[in-house]
Image (tube, rainbow, N blue to C red):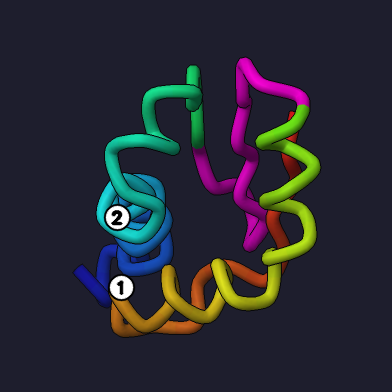
Amino acid sequence: MERAGLTDTLNEQRAAAVWVDVVGPAINRYTSRRYVDRGVMHVYLTSAPLKNELSFNRARLIEAINRAVGADVVKEIQFH
């Protein structure tokens, strides 16, 4: 994977996949789409109050996602 240059892409996919484990099923229910692009995780939510609440916990979410992936993949989270 490293020789092919796919390690970063694989870790980005893992980061998007562990979102459910980090936030839990109750919050994931309001997530319509998520992906990681160049260190920025984009999360599309259907609830404005939840978007506001999660924005206050950005640093903790980034830390938990990176810990679950086992690499420093996510540098920032943008909620849409």
- Which residue occupies the extreme left position in the image? 1
What amino acid does circle 2 point to?
Val
- Magenta residues span 35-48
Number of callouts: 2
**Magenta region includes residue 3:** no
Residue drawn at (67%, 55%) of the image: 40
Q: Which of disc 1 and disc 2 is earlier in sequence?
A: 2
Crowding around mark 1 (Cα neighbors within 10 Å: few <14, some 14 to 19, many 20+) is some
Q: Residue at x 30, y 83 (%)?
A: 70
Front: mark 2 or 1: 2
Quarter placement of the C terminus: top right
Q: Say which element carries label 1.
A: helix
Which amino acid type corresponds to the residue marked 1 in the rendered image? Val
Residue at 39% x, 34% y is: 28
Describe residue 32's horizontal placement relative to residue 19 as left or right: right
24 left or right of 80 in image: left
The percent position of residue 6, horizontal first and vertical second, equals: 32, 60
- Which image quadrant is residue 74 in? bottom right
Measure the alpha-carbon separation of dots 2 and 1.
7 Å
Q: Position of residue 64 (x, y in %)?
A: 44, 76
Percent position of residue 72, x then y = 49, 82
Say above or below: 15 vs 53: below
Q: Which residue is mark 1?
A: 69
The residue beneath circle 2 is 18
